[in-house]
Structure formats: C-alpha cells, structure tokens
Amino acid sequence: MQPLREESVVIETSHTTVHYLDKLRNRKKPLRYMQKDGRFPVDIHTSPGGWCPYVTDIFTTLVECRWAWMFLMFSLSYILSWIFFGLCYWLIAHANGDEYNEDDDLCVYNVRGFTSAFLFSMETQATIGYGFRGMSENCIVAIIVVTIQDVFSCLLDTIIIGIVVAKMASACKRAQTVGFSSCAVVNLRNGVLCLSWRLGDFRGNHIVDGVVKAQLVRHIKQPMAGSLRMVYQHIEVEEREVVLATPATIIHKINHNSPLYTLGPEDIKQDTFEIVVSFTYTGDSTGMLHQTRTSFSPSDIRWGQRFQEMLKPGKKHYKVDYARFNETNWVPVPMMSAEEYDRERSSLNNNEAQYQLFKPVLCSTSPDVIEVVQQTSL
C-alpha cells in the first residue's frame, strides 16, 4: 500500500497551470525550534534554585501566569488578609473579655466571636463602614492593628491593580496584532537570489519604527554523545530598521556570506534548519517594548515565488488588502543554489546564460501526462 500523496494546483505563471505532488504526507515532521506563533517548545525540568527565582520576582511571575491563577491569587490575598486581621481582633477581644463584657470598657464593640471579628476586619479593609462594629479609644493595641491593616490594604490594592494593568497591557497581546507571513519566498531581485518574507501591523495606530533580526538555527545530532546541539548563524537583512505604516517585505540577499548560499531548492527540502525572525518595537500607546517572533522551516520556504501586491493608492488613502498577505505567485527563478547561479552566470555570456539558467522545466502530474513550463528571463 502506497502512502498518501497530496496534489496541489498553482494557477499563476502566465503560461500554464502547474501541477505538482507534495512529499509524503505521512512523513514524520521534525520538532521545531520555535512554533509559528513565536513560542518555544521547551520544557524546563530542573531549574537552578527551584522556586526561589519565581518567588523573588513575584511581580513578573504573576504577570506571566494565566488569568485563572491570577484571579486565584487575587482572591486568596484578600481573603487570607481578612482572616489574619480578623484573628487578631478576635484575640484582642478575647484577651480583654469583650465576649462577656457588657459595659463600656471594650476594645472592639459588638465583636463576640471569630465570625464578628472577621466581618469587622473585612469592613475595615474594604472601607465598607456599616457602623455596627467599631473600636474604642480604650485599647491602644486595637488602634495599632487597625492602622497596620489600613496601610497594608493600600499596599495590597496598589500591587493587585499594578499586576492587572501590566497583564492587560502585556506585550504578547500587542504582538498578536503584528504578524509575519506564513511562508518565505526565494526569487530574483536585480539579478541576485533573495529570501524574503512579509511583516505587517494589523492595527489602526501603526508602529513608527522597529528593528528586524533573523538567525538560522541548525539541529546537529551528536550520536556518540547522545545529545543535540544548536548552531546559530546570523542572517543579514536589508533595512533592519523598518517603518511599519504599511506592510514591509524583509529581504535577505543570498550571497557568499549567507548560510543559504550553497543550498538549492532540493537541498533546502532535505535540510533541517530553521530561520528564526523577530521584530522588536515600542508600542505607541503604552510605551512598552514588544517583540513579535516566528520561524520558517524548509517546508515554509517557497522557491520561485513572489508575494502578491497588496498596496494600492486611492484618492485620499493607501488601500492595503491583507487578504493577500500570504498569497504568492510563481516567477521564473533558476532551480539551483546561489553559488551555482553565480558561477554559471560568470562563466557564460549573457545570451548563453539566459538560455542555460532559464531552461524549460518538466512538471510531471501523472504517469501519462507531462507538462512543460517555459520560463522566461527577467
């Protein structure tokens, strides 16, 4: 029984419709270094110091935790503080004999047990002030405890409000409105093979500028040591500082300094590298530093394609069609590595190079049908 294959149809070459068969669908996919949404699939089993770093930096820990845990900590912080100070008031009333004393020599009025002491603690910290329970000037200890609870209440409210505001204005929420294209393309620009991908801001209040970075990550297995090693190579991009008023196309020239220089389309399909890209910027509304990340595996790189135009001038505004943000068209590109392309182009004259580098390509769609796509020179 043959494994399943998937047929894809691309209708954009100005010549014909190209049919091609994808690779085996049941092929095991390698583990990504970074997910498409920018998250790292890393599980830390044993961290130095255990829980101490998380407790020491409790503010960051609470900001990064889930909302369910945040509401749990929010509720427990108030309830436990009410119980603690209620216990203090109950002990003060019990030591002064307020439970059985009916005269005016009381520390806390109408506190006859722990339940009434808990209610007095909650009314004091929440500034409800029903007026039924209260303290007298006869007991200095109760006055000190009420003062401490008032100060603690202000401090706790400030911390809780700060954490909630910081969590609502979290950088990851703003980063969801700035996105990269789902694929990267390889085509010719001014006679040079280039790798490019798109970057866009989907909000109305656009980002003024930001910085783009890219790295190539390789997974190198060491059978003798039984370990996996990550190798990082810098990818140089043109115009690292981007003004994102309209969608931008990030371009990397595949020259002799590029880690992709020796890789052709078939080499890329069989390789296991991953291109990690990021865009770091400052939010115009909050002033906070944000970062949007994604990665491109070899299966995400489309050789011989270009992005469709999505920016059109109107009468008063530029119109951006984000429905074409990930759409690509086929373009004639030599099916060889940039190293081979430069060597062939330098060894041949212009006329010979035009024929040799852009020769007809055979596209097999079935055992009985073979289509020819005549590529034209740029």
Image (cartoon, rainbow, N blue to C red):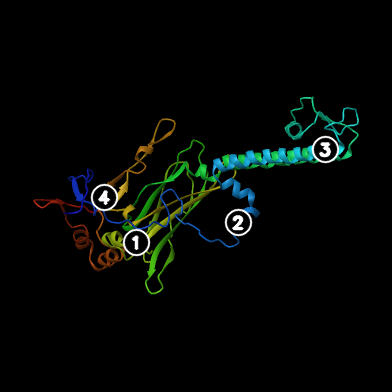
Say whether marks 3 and 1 touch (CB < 8 Å): no
Where residue 81 sits: x, y (%)? 71, 40
According to the picture, the residue beneath numbered tag 4 turns out to be 331
Which three-letter amino acid code belongs to the residue tagged 4? Answer: Val
Q: Please state which of the two labelled residues, at mark 3 or mark 1, is closer to the viewer.
A: 3
**SS for tag 1?**
loop
For badge 1, the amino acid type reads Thr
Query: Of residues 32 and 52, which is closer to you in this image?
Result: 52
Q: Name the residue that disc number 1 marks.
A: 272
Give the distance between the C-alpha atoms of the residues marked 1 and 2, in whole angstroms.
35 Å
CA distance for labels 3 and 2: 39 Å
Q: Quickly name the residue at label 2.
A: 51
Q: Nearer the viewer, mark 1 or mark 4?
A: 1
Give whichever of discs 1 and 4 has the lower sequence position.
Answer: 1
Left or right of residue 54, residue 82 in this image: right
Judged from the image, the secondary structure of the residue bearing numbered disc 3 is helix
Q: Residues within 10 Å of mark 4 (few under 14, many from 20)?
A: many
- Residue 19, image x, y percentages: 18, 48
Q: Earlier in the sequence, mark 4 or mark 3?
A: 3
Relative image position of residue 356 (x, y in whole percent): 19, 61
Residue positioned most to the front = 100
The label nearer to you, 3 versus 2, is 3
Name the amino acid type tagged 2: Trp
Mark with earlier residue (4, 2): 2
Q: Residue furthest left?
A: 368
Name the residue: 18% across, 58% down: 359
- Numbered tag placed on residue 94 in the rendering: 3
Circles 4 and 2 in contact, beta carbons < 8 Å: no
The residues bearing labels 4 and 2 have C-alpha atoms spaced at a distance of 55 Å
Q: Secondary structure at mark 4?
A: loop
Marks 4 and 3 sit apart, C-alpha to C-alpha, by 87 Å
Disc with the residue nearer the chain's start (3 vs 2): 2
